[in-house]
Image: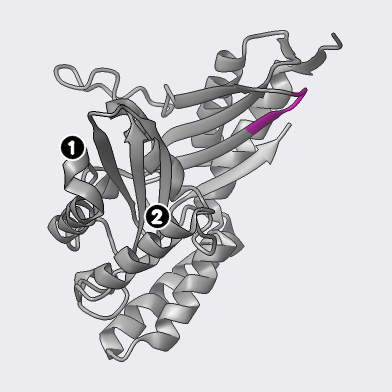
Amino acid sequence: MNVRKIPASQITEAVKKLFMDCNYYIGDDISQALKDARENEDLQIAKDVLQQLIDNNSIAANERIPMCQDTGMAVLFVEYGDKVAVEDGSFKDAVEEGVRRAYIDGYLRKSVVSDPVFDRKNTKDNTPAIIHTEITQGDKIHITAGGKGFGSENMSAIKMLTPSAGVEGVKKFVLDTVAHAGPNPCPPMVVGVGIGGTFEKAAQLAKRATLRPINTSNPDERYAKLENELLEEINKMNIGPAGLGGKTSALGLNIETYPTHIAGMPVAVNICCHACRHKEVTI
């Protein structure tokens, strides 16, 4: 079996660029959605807020500065080829060094504390990262990286529904979660929904769903229809841009699913602000 060797330094540089870029450059799908939403709004204050977001994103890109002061906690979804070997270091250490360099060299805010309850001392380099790894076939490593801000993360939720709740139970939980979030996630928001698996799998699915382009649909037409229905209902809530009212409470809603146990139906909702920072690379 031929094994491809990748220097740890190459991974570090790739991760550094991912986190700097995702904080400086808004995604094309989000950018277009903001412009479309501005044209669709009737309320002048909603139009103004959307224009301010568009202008803000343009300034961030042109000046290579963060589009938001909360540059997030580093989250990575990694598809790691089974014919890859990292040399001159470990994959995890290479990723952590990439995050460290991005947040220090890129002048991104360091938001991670070493202990969640007692000490809460800032690590001063935004490490450690959250790394989700899946072993795949091949000799490449694909990384999707996101900087997850916590104004929106704090509004996320998970619920262990029973199968009898059905699709209506799923819809109610998603809509109740978004309604409770209200203006707190800096709307217009991007909503990720994970259904299935176990408690922790549903949450991962929801987070992964926020990283899927919002101009795509779930390949299963039933879930694609549900995505559209939920997005339509959310945009009737009149939360609006910056919580000031309007038609655009959410720019997109993505659903990801996984098989689950006969006795359960876990559902998780992960909410992002409009920026929904993420970039990806194949090494």
- For image coordinates 52% across by 61% down, the residue present is 60
- For image coordinates 15% across by 56% down, the residue present is 176
- Mark 1 neighbour density, 10 Å: few (under 14) some (14–19) many (20 or more): some
Residue type for callout 2: Cys
Question: Which of the 4 image quarters holds residue 129?
Answer: top left
Q: Is residue 59 visible?
A: no
Number of numbered discs overlaid on the protein picture? 2
Q: Which residues are magenta?
A: 138-142
Q: Viewer-nearest of labels 1 and 2?
A: 1
User: Looking at the image, which is closer to me, 135 or 198?
Assistant: 198
Quarter in which the C terminus is drawn? top right
Name the dominant secondary structure of the magenta segment: loop
User: What is the spatial separation of the Cα atoms under label 1 and label 2, in whole angstroms?
Assistant: 39 Å
Q: Which residue is mark 2?
A: 68
Q: Judge whether 121 appears above or below 144 on screen.
A: above
Q: Sequence order check: which comes first, mark 1 or mark 2?
A: 2
Q: Which residue is mark 1?
A: 162
